[in-house]
Amino acid sequence: MLKMTHLSKIYRTEVVETYALRDFSVNVEEGEFVAVMGPSGSGKTTFLTIAGLLESFDGGEYRLDGEDVSKLNDNARSKIRNEKIGFVFQSFNLIPDLNVFDNVDVPLRYRGFKARERAQRIHDALETVGLVSRMKHLPAQLSGGQQQRVAIARALAGSPRLLLADEPTGNLDSLMARQVLDLIESINDHGTTVVMVTHDPELARRAHRSVHVLDGQVMDLQAVSESSKDETPARA
Amino acid sequence: MFSYYMNLALRSLKHNPVLTVLMVLAIAVGIGASMTTLTVMHLLSGDPLPGKSTHLFYAQVHSDPDKHRDPLDMLDYRSAVDLWSAHRADRQTLIVDSAIKVRAPDKNLPPLMLQMLSTTTDFFPMFSVPFQYGRSWSADDDARHARVAVISSDLNDRLFNGADSVGQTLRLGDSDVRIVGVLAPWRPSPLFYDVRGGRFAAGDTASFYTAPQDVFTPFNTGLEINDGNFQQFTCWRVPETPGHLENSACVWIGLWVQLDNNAKVAAYRQFLADYAAQQKSLGRFEYTDTRLLSLMQWLDFNHVVPSDVRLQTWLAFAFLIICLFNTISLLLAKFLRRAGEIGVRRALGASRSAVFAQCLVEAGLIGLLGGIGGWLLTLIGLWLIRRQPIAYADLVHLDTGMFVLTFVLAIAASLLAGVLPALRASRVMPALQLKTL
Amino acid sequence: MQIRPILIALRRHRLATLLIAVEIALACAVLCNACFLIANRLAFVQIDSGVDGASLATIQLTGYDVSKADDLNARVLTALHGIAGVKSVSVINSIPFGMRRGTAGIFTDAAAQHFGGVVDFYVGGPGSFQALGLQMASGRAPQSEDYQQPVVNFVPASAPVQITRALAEHLWPGTNPIGKQFWMGTSQFRVVGVLNALVRPDPSGPADQREWSVFVPAQPGPYLAGSYLLRAEPGDLPHVMRDALATIAKTIPDVVIDRADSHTLDTLRRSYFEKDRTMMGMLAGVIIALLLVTALGIVGLTSFWVTQRRKQIGIRRALGATRGDILRYFQTENFLIVTFGIVLGMTLAYGINLFLMTRYELPHLPWLYLPVGAIVLWLLGQLAVLGPALRAAQVPPVVATRSV
């Protein structure tokens, strides 16, 4: 599903060049639930932005669903983000002026669906996260956990193949965090590939396997991922 | 998608009503000022005879033997009559105007002092003058100095309450003339056939836009019945009898000719040159300069549009530009304040062009609202101009073309103002780590 | 105040800064030139006519037979003398801000070799000079025997005349004009007096030629008739005028009263300058709208910046910046942007002025307009920034600790 080989990403300022990612290789199979772990500044968020086609990279190769994405223009990248990828952010990133319904509607609009299909999908997505009754609420009228569930519904509405989550529970208390994680897990159970960035080992344990990032490189994972190794091929 | 963007734009405008009102107001005021002045410009600088003006020419020779300068703006009597009676053009007409006392003998009304145009019969078909009753006099009437007249619809209203007055008698000065025609309302802008001397007016040319004369008589009839009351354009020797100019050293008559193709124009130019050369050999002319300008060239040459009107137009557009810069910076602030939202939209699959389009639709909507405001302000502006004591006040109105232009200009201006901010907004990076929305 | 950090911040907002600066530059350029145009019109509107306008009115008659002009003059003078409140009635061809009937080119030699320019002749019958209330600078006023000459065309064949100081200075610079002669066609004029001022009937020409006027005493007759000057106390003038028009309509019914031109001189003057006042009003309106729009632009953009920098402001406050510091930060920032705009605007103002000079015969923009325009814009900028800056100063330090 997601395959990066020898990927590098350099941030340049007037004075210095910093390698955010260096010789970064990772392979996520269809249907996997992978946690990406690492300390602050290790490059795990950079990995996620590149994986989500939000940023370009400087060297190496990235294939998403078998397609080389490095040569794609902005329109094509936007289309892939829109159709194949769902995002869940740490700070929810709901558009404050839009109510729940309209927030979930955003990616569907860019998809060009007809009104009837959009309404159906929004309804289904909100049903999945249990917030159909809050359809007309504004984000500010919801709790943090509810907001994150709306964000997940928004990510789900377009039936993406890949869900990218960046510290999805980082701004939530533990009870709500558990609900959100249950939700992500059930999404994965329905076949969506999930890549979740987190620094919390507790959360990472819920994934099929973990990838550890340090100084912009993937660490040798043999020892760490041994436990989940049996499961992985079975799902692939 | 457009309706979605429209919906979003409406939300966004409602979300920040104060900023919206400021932007709409700035555009409305700029558009109102520009369209008011532009409408006046349009009315004053337009072609008074569309489709026909290219075939109409104003003939000039230089009869002043003392000073070598541009051909004079009008003709002396002899040159005018010589050139006219040669009949070398498809149509030709002499014009001279004068003030005359007018009475309707049967009516008990106080006498009126009115402008009378003395001209030849071609005047009416040449300038497409519309008739309500009767028709113009004949070439024979011209030759016989017939005591006939055509009157304006305005004078017909005043003297005969708008009824068909053909056959009625009018007293011009001390002579009785028979009315043979009544014009339909006719208000050329400017009064092109009477335009002259504009370059000496220091830009104060509003008087070129007065209404046409009220009384029209055959050329020689006019000279006879109003003898002693003619005004010279200029003289190189003071006339012996003021107001009687037939054998004076003065220019006071205009000659318009209609030439239907380029060959005829060239031939007429040659005719004028030959005439001037012949007059020089006769010792009457000293200089052989001639000029034959088309109607629009003649209007240009006379700077018919008053300089105040042009200055106002410049000023209004400078103001519009300032309003636009204002709109650009406010739109920039507005769009970049939503950088977070735009980042999310980008992450959720909006392409750069989608963001750009969304922003432009919002700018265009502001333009549309500004256009409505601008239209209302233009109506107020034109109403204010109509109340001014200027010759063209009664002409001022907003025609369909200018009405449409108001909105085109408003939307075009706001889209133009929106391009830069929209471009900036579409460059907002799609992002994960958005702290503020 | 530290300027460097502000400059650095402004560089990060290059586009917005540039936009506001350009807007201010345009405003500055238009402001200076519009004010200058107003000042020019104002000087024109306030022109000294040289005559005692408040006490004067004119009656214009047309539609009479030239051969019966003497009879008309006699009847009008008699009829008007009888009206209560009339101090004097006289015949004169032209009136300041009224009809123009004596415009002609003159020569300073009999052979017509030295052109003296185009002047306006005021040809007046007995009593008209005193009625106008003209002020002598030197020489003498017309005496009763000066009014004996009949008008042959529109002036007498020869006459002792009074000319304005401006015309004298133009024709014979630096010399005493008394006794000098000039010619118009075959008519010959000898200067016997110099007037302080007497404006042309239509002073719209070049500014330095507005007072090229000549007063010619003459005998009313066929070619000096139909145009009358009435003098009365300013308070009596309206009813004198009303009675005069009524009397003429009744006693001389076959003549046509030119009602559009028969008015008090003050009325004529007011309608003559109507379009200039309209233009001044429009210019003033544009200036006000311009300043408002510019101010709103500054308010809008600064508000945006304040919102954007709330966190930063909170941090500064937490680190010990006083409210005054924050206020001054935004004020200084605005001052810098406006200054930048003004520098741009001065160049632009000068350019526009050059353009107007070629197109509208305007004089050079006096340099004084530039600093005044600059001060106005600085004040405007400070006024506009005050609101948002005060809001910025109200941002509590605690904002620094919040994550949003």
Image (tube, coloured by chain):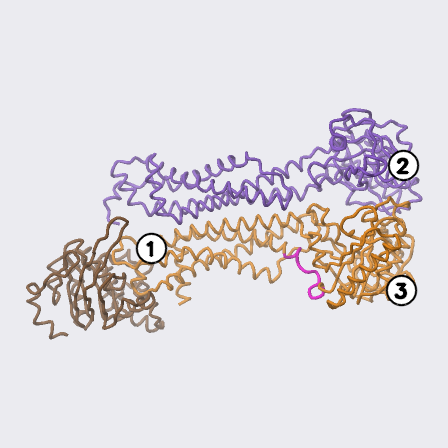
Numbered badge on residue C269: none
Instruction: Please tell me which residue is depicted at 90% across the width and 54% down the height of the picture.
Output: B225
Pinpoint residue B374: horizontal percent, then vertical percent: 54, 54
Q: CA distance from mark 2 to mark 1?
A: 86 Å
- Decide: is C168 above or below A102: above
Q: Which residue is mark 2?
A: C157
The chain that appears orange in the image is: B
Pinpoint residue A167: horizontal percent, then vertical percent: 19, 58
Tell me which chain the residue with mark 1 is part of.
B
Nearer the viewer's eye, disc 2 or disc 1?
2
- Disc nearer the start of the sequence (3/1): 3
**Residue A142 visible at all:** yes
Is A52 on the left or on the right of C345, as rendered? Answer: left
Amino acid at the residue labelled 2: Ala
Nearer the viewer's eye, disc 2 or disc 3?
2
- The question of residue C168 being in magenta is answered with no
Q: Nearer the viewer, residue C228 or B105?
A: C228
- The question of residue B43 being in magenta is answered with yes
Task: Assign the C terminus of chain B to one quadrant of the image.
Answer: bottom left
